[in-house]
Structures are given as structure tokens and as C-alpha cells.
Image (cartoon, helix red, strand yellow):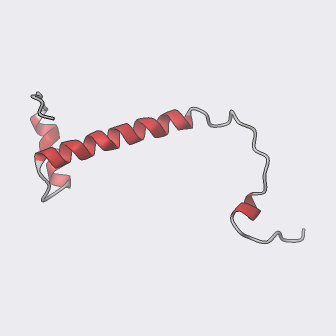
Amino acid sequence: MRTTLNIDDAALAGAMKTAPGLTKTAVINEALREYARRRRVRRILDFRGRAPWEGDLEMLRGRERRAR
């Protein structure tokens, strides 16, 4: 989809330096995907500590229980 945007020149130049070889379009699309991913992770982290945990982490990791 074509869209006309007013983009901060310095911000775009900085992003282009970190992604040599990519086009402006590719850099902007990657930035949008990363922004969306970070927002999803942030929403998931909002649930931290709200659900009770009952389980054996060592078993899930595939380790044998050690005798104490």
C-alpha cells in the first residue's frame, strides 16, 4: 500500500546506518514489525505474576530430579 508520510530524516538516516543494504521501505517495514512485536510482548508481560504456577520446571526442562 502506498502512503505519504512525513518521516524524521535523522531517525531514518540512523535506521539506514544500522541496516546497510536495505531500502528505505524495507527498513520502515522492519521497524513497524518490531514495534508491533514489542507492544505484544509488553501486553503479555502485564500478566506476569497474575496466574498461579503449579508444575515441575525440572521435568519440563527434561532433567532428572536430584535427591536432596
Q: Where residue 48 sits: x, y (%)?
A: 62, 37
Q: Where residue 59 sits: x, y (%)?
A: 76, 63
Give the residue displayed 9% in from the left and 28% down from the top. 4
26 sits to left or right of 38: left
Check the picture and name the quadrant holding the N terminus: top left
Residue nearest the observer in this picture, 22 or 13: 22
* Vertical comparison of 4 with 10: above or below: above
Give the residue displayed 22% in from the left and 43% down from the top. 29
Q: Residue furthest front?
A: 1
Q: Where residue 57 sits: x, y (%)?
A: 73, 58
Question: Hey, which quadrant is residue 68 in on the image?
Answer: bottom right
36 sits to left or right of 24: right
* Vertical comparison of 37 with 57: above or below: above
Give the residue displayed 12% in from the left and 28% down from the top. 5
* Vertical comparison of 7 with 41: above or below: above
The total of numbered circles placed on residues is 0
8 sits to left or right of 31: left
Q: Where residue 64 sits: x, y (%)?
A: 79, 72
Give the residue displayed 17% in from the left and 38% down from the top. 11
